[in-house]
């Protein structure tokens, strides 16, 4: 068993969405003074997340366009009774990336850079030390490595969530389908289709990402307190694709499933002086929706700018206070059953342009826009919930392994 020690400006633990995005932002051409980076990703299959789809929205070209699978300029929501609410996204495009393509694109770029070291090892301990922080790692062969940096960014998923007033799970299973006959309108992404039977608690919807006239990712999603069994998801997808979408004959080419906590917990972003938490474990997941990818990009760019300008690195909050407060009310109103989830979202998209809702979810809308959005929700139950929130206790929420790694 050998022991090696390496020193760089920045150590990043975890090469998923947040780790790779930060390494990319720190080293992208034009990022200024080269920053030396060590990025450590575990070789242990039990710790690595399954391949996944990341959707987000953006104006204009982006850094990861070469890894895009599809993008859409129209968005549709369907109410329980089949009411169709459809809108243009103006300059925004709803985009879909696959994690394997993203990892290959960013990973190969990083591998070619002399000041970046990609380390295949499992970080066992992360700690602050004089002048920075270090990660104590072990390779698949059992060799021990210490990676030391002035700053360390840790994206390893946690075993539990911080205490919260409300925690729901967004849990889903999806099929990549190929139909025999043309069945999809590949101009429009179907964000929420509430025609599926609604659960007693929370809400359920179909989500359709068309990739061509005969190809799509079709998902069944619930926001509720616990995931379903494998058989229950399969039955729900079967019903959605056959009875509601009426796809006709099709083959399932691959499957995607996941669990994303939706919580009003407060996530610590800094542990000691030089250890920072990024990604989902650092609170980048938007409580009301589970979207994480865009917040990760915003945070990565802010860290890169601070390092470039020689400023003290302080991770900016992934989401603004007003957005978090509004999300906390929404989660609680949903959890208590004070608002009906499917009606809530259908009404929101009916009353507000889709583009404005998406901008709110990315934190780029102003105070007046957010107030108008608030008034597009059922004001009475939401106000009652807002008044109650400060008096509620925050409680911990343990995660199963499946829930903590998605
Ligand atoms: C199936 C699924 C679909 C999703 N879809 C979307 C979406 O469409 N849009 C969106 O915005 N968000 C989505 N999310 C939420 C979120 O974007 C993802 O969970 C995202 O992967 C979070 O990024 P992360 O870097 O925090 O975590 P991860 O991407 O999980 O990265 C953590 C990394 O740390 C590594 N690691 C773990 N332990 C160790 C260790 N001890 N040492 C070294 N490395 C370690 C893991 O192998 C992994 O690569 C989705 C989540 C899931 C589960």
Image: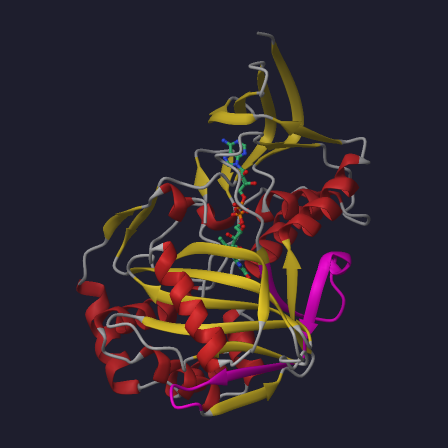
Q: Work out which quarter of the rendered image holds the N terminus and state it.
A: top right
Asked if residue 389 is positioned above or below residue 367 in the image, the reply reads: above
Relative to 221, say whether 45 is above or below.
above
In the shown orientation, is residue 246 left or right of residue 341?
A: right
336 left or right, relative to 205: left
Q: Nearer the viewer, residue 341 or 376?
A: 341
Q: Camera-side residue: 294 or 32?
A: 294
Q: Tell me the residue at 71%/61% (across/down).
A: 68
Q: Where is residue 125? Give x, y as percent.
A: 46, 25
User: Residue 391: x percent and y percent?
Assistant: 17, 63
Who's the residue at 19% across and 56% down the image? 393
Does residue 390 sit above or below 43 in this rendering?
below
Magenta residues span: 54-82
Q: What is the image's colouring?
A: secondary structure
Q: Quadrant of residue 354?
A: bottom right
On the image, the x and y values in percent for residue 17 come to 59, 49
The answer to whether 353 is drawn above or below residue 133 in the figure is: below
Q: Residue 81 in magenta? A: yes
Magenta segment includes 180: no
277 or 349, nearer to the observer: 349
Instruction: Identify the residue at image location x=44%, y=69%.
Output: 238
User: Of residues 38 and 325, which is closer to you in this image?
Assistant: 38
- Can the viewer see residue 288? no
Q: Position of residue 61 (x, y in %)?
A: 76, 66
Q: Residue at x 52, y 33 (%)?
A: 274
The answer to whether residue 52 shows anywhere in this view is yes
């Amino acid at each position: 068993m050998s022991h090696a020690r390496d020193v760089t400006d920045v150590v990043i633990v975890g090469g998923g969405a947040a780790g790779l995005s930060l390494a990319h932002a720190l080293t992208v051409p034009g990022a200024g003074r080269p920053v030396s980076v060590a990025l450590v990703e575990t070789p242990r299959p039990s710790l690595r997340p399954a391949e996944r789809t990341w959707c987000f929205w953006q104006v204009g070209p982006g850094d990861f366009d070469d890894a895009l699978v599809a993008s859409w300029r129209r968005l549709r929501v369907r109410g329980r009774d089949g009411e169709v609410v459809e809108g243009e996204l103006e300059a925004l495009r709803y985009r879909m990336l696959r994690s394997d393509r993203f990892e290959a694109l960013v990973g190969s770029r990083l591998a070619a850079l002399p000041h970046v070291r990609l380390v295949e090892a499992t970080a066992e301990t992360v700690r602050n030390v004089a002048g920075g922080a270090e990660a104590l790692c072990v390779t698949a062969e059992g060799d021990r490595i210490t990676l030391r940096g002035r700053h360390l960014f840790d994206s390893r998923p946690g075993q539990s969530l911080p205490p919260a007033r409300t925690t729901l799970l967004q849990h889903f299973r999806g099929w990549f389908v190929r139909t025999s006959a043309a069945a999809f309108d590949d101009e429009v992404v179907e964000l929420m289709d509430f025609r599926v039977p609604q659960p007693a608690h929370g809400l359920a919807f179909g989500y359709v990402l068309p990739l061509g006239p005969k190809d799509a990712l079709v998902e069944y999603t619930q926001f509720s307190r616990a995931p379903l069994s494998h058989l229950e998801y399969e039955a729900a997808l079967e019903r959605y694709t056959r009875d509601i979408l009426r796809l006709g004959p099709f083959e399932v080419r691959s499957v995607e499933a996941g669990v994303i906590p939706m919580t009003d917990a407060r996530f610590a972003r800094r542990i000691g002086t030089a250890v920072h938490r990024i990604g989902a474990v650092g609170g980048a997941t938007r409580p009301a929706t589970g979207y994480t990818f865009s917040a990760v990009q915003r945070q990565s760019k802010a860290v890169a700018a601070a390092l470039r300008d020689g400023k003290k690195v302080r991770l900016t909050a992934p989401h603004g206070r007003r957005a978090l407060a509004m999300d906390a009310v929404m989660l609680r109103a949903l959890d208590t059953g004070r608002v009906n989830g499917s009606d809530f979202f259908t009404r929101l998209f009916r009353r507000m342009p889709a583009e404005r809702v998406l901008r709110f979810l990315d934190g780029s809308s102003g105070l007046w826009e957010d107030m108008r959005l608030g008034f597009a929700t059922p004001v009475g139950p939401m106000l009652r919930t807002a008044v109650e929130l400060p008096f509620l206790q925050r409680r911990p929420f343990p995660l199963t392994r499946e829930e903590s790694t998605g």
